[in-house]
Image (cartoon, rainbow, N blue to C red):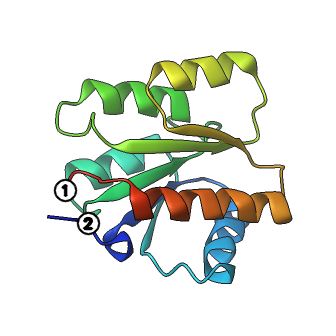
Amino acid sequence: MKTNSKDVTLLLVEDDDIDAMTIERGFLKQRIANPIVRAYDGIEALELLRSNKVSRPLIILLDLQMPRMGGIEFLKQLRADETLSDLVVFVLTTSKSEEDMLSSYKQHIAGYFIKDDSGEKFLDIVNVLDSYWKIVQLPK
């Protein structure tokens, strides 16, 4: 059964309210109406996923620098969980650290985007994500 791109839920794991609003506005500006569920850190995101409070198919948009549980630790726990290990994750972070980038890709992320690429570049990121879930088949 083919997944309709409108069925894809975005799990936004982001502790910063301004960054979260910017992301949500970017999707609205591009007329992307997919549901967005927000978690404030890795612990909350894992709780939402493990309790099935985020519907599949879904794509995770993950910040790295967060309180309680940051993005790298979240990725390690996600990949270690047999029921969650197949989820698609894009990192959206302020970190330009080569170490953070390598650690993220070692956890099989789909892409790594730098947040301070604002304005038109940010809309390009939104368009990439929209195009991605329109053409890729995601497991339910």
Residue 67, given in percent of the width and then of the height, sits at 59, 40
Q: Is residue 22 above or below residue 109?
A: below
Which secondary structure, mark 2?
loop
* Earlier-in-chain disc, 1 versus 2: 2
Quarter of the rendering containing residue 128: bottom right
Give above or below for 51 relative to 104.
below
Residue type (three-letter) at the residue carrying disc 2: Thr
Task: Answer whether residue 14 is visible to the viewer in this image.
Answer: yes
Indicate the quadrant where residue 84 lies. Answer: top left
Q: Is residue 7 left or right of residue 125?
A: left
Q: CB atoms at circles 1 and 2 under 8 Å apart?
A: yes
Residues at marks 1 and 2, CA–CA distance in whole angstroms:
9 Å
The residue shown at (43%, 65%) is: 134
The reply to whether residue 70 is in sight is no
Residue at left offset 18%, top offset 30%: 82
Q: Secondary structure at mark 1?
A: loop
Residue holding disc 1: 140
Q: Residues within 10 Å of mark 2 (few under 14, many from 20)?
A: some
Q: Who's the residue at 63% across and 64% down the image?
A: 127
Name the residue beneath numbered marker 2: 3
Amino acid of disc 1: Lys
The answer to whether 57 is drawn above or below residue 80 in the figure is below
Residue 37 position by quadrant = bottom left
Name the residue nearer the viewer: 39 or 106: 106
Q: Position of residue 39 (x, y in %)?
A: 46, 57
